[in-house]
Image (tube, helix red, strand yellow):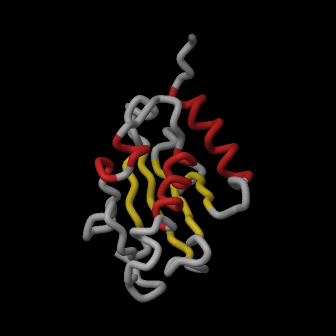
Amino acid sequence: MAVVPRNFRLLEELEKGEKGIGDGSCSYGLEDSDDITMSYWNGTIIGPGHTVHENRIYSLKIHCDEAYPDSPPRISFVSRVNLPFVAANGQVEAGKIGVLAHWRRNYTIENVLVEMRKEMASPNNRKLPQPSEGSTY
């Protein structure tokens, strides 16, 4: 099977991210439309219903280095959040969330955002006390 070059892959992801994912609960796009390397992205997760995250909008920074998609993106929350896979500085700890810990080349930014949103709704995380809404790292 042919390997899709990094930039073609990121162009596909950009197109999909701009259209929105499913119900619109996650979105992502380039931080700067002039970033020809397509390395720096912004993401948004709308907190899942019936949890402490309901109606909260979480902003994230996503970095796809030269090794992407062979290696996972680095992700950090801009919005403060209390989750077991997020370090005190907002960095998502790759080893603590399945999609990043077991990264495969065919995984995407979308896969990561959707997985993190599912983790927010998991029984262990749905009622964790959260920082005040609107606070940032």
Picture residue at 51% right of the left edge, 67% below the top: 121
Residue 59 % position (x, y):
50, 68
Q: Name, please, the residue furthest toward the front.
A: 123
Picture residue at 40% right of the left edge, 40% below the top: 72
130 left or right of 45 in image = left
Residue 47 % position (x, y):
56, 72
Rendered image quadrant of residue 44: bottom right
- The front one of 31 and 13 is 13
Q: Is residue 28 above or below residue 130?
A: above
Residue 98 % position (x, y):
39, 46
Picture residue at 43% right of the left edge, 43% below the top: 64
Picture residue at 50% right of the left edge, 53% below the top: 115
- The front one of 35 and 99 is 99
Q: Quadrant of the C terminus?
A: bottom left
19 left or right of 57 in image = right
Q: Quadrant of the N terminus?
A: top right
Residue 134 % position (x, y):
47, 84
- The front one of 119 and 22 is 119
Q: Is residue 104 above or below residue 14?
A: above
Q: Is residue 62 above or below residue 36?
A: below
Q: Name, please, the residue furthest toward the left.
A: 88
Rendered image quadrant of residue 80: bottom left
Tally of numbered tags: 0
Q: Is residue 10 above or below residue 23?
A: above
